[in-house]
Amino acid sequence: MWFGRIDNPKDIETELTKVSSAIIQSFEKACPERKIGKRNRVPWWNHELKTLRKKANKAFHTAYRTREQKDWDKHKEARRAFKRVLRKSKRESWHDFCTNLENVHESARLYKLLGKSSDAHVTSPEWRMDKNA
């Protein structure tokens, strides 16, 4: 980058503006703006779980505020109901995933199992014969 002659503070500001704009242009070229997609959603989450979690959290805040045993019991029951439905939903989702996986071609099935991630590697095992065998 070429800097001009600097004789006074105004020249410093001018050159600083040039350097700053060059840095910003380089950044914008290297990192273009893009729309951020949706967060990864889990397949087992549903509206019922959302409602039950809200109820359990509300019961907790009520029990924490009042410190009464009956409110703690309500919270305990609401939390238990939430966890019960959560486990059921996760179990059903896993069952659906496995059922749908059995209907897919083998190569697509392997790809789906690995989760389409670049860090999952499949290596073939090395079969070695024992010398005594």
Image (cartoon, grey):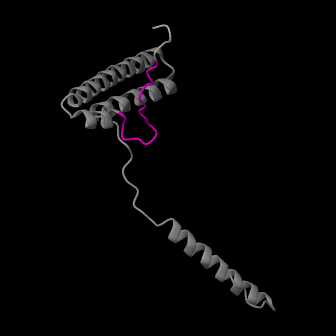
Q: What's drawn in magenta, residue-wise?
A: 114-128
**Which quarter of the picture shows residue 57?**
top left
Q: How far from the left and from the top, in percent, is residue 117?
A: 41, 41
At a point 28% along the width and 34% down the height, the residue shown is: 46
Q: Is 123 in the magenta? A: yes
Residue 106 in the image: state x and y as whole percent. 24, 32
Against 1, residue 83 (above or below) is above
In front of the other: 113 or 27: 113
How many marks the image carries: the answer is: 0
Q: The N terminus appears in which quarter of the rendering?
A: bottom right
- Relative to residue 121, is residue 88 depicted above or below? above
Name the residue furthest left. Answer: 103
Type of secondary structure dominating the magenta stretch:
loop
Which quarter of the picture shows residue 47? top left
With 45 as the anchor, is 132 left or right in this view?
right
* Residue farthest toward the right in the current orientation of the protein: 7
Residue 95: percent from left, percent from top: 25, 24
User: Residue 85 placed where, x, y %?
Assistant: 30, 23
Would you say residue 121 sits in the magenta stretch? yes
Query: 67 left or right of 80?
Result: right
In which quadrant will I find the C terminus? top left
Q: Residue at x 61, y 73 (%)?
A: 23
Towards the viewer: 74 or 32 = 32
**Residue 74: which quarter of the image?**
top left
Residue 131 is left or right of residue 51, and the answer is right
- Which sits in the foreground, 106 or 86? 106
The residue at the point 69 percent across, 87 percent down is: 14
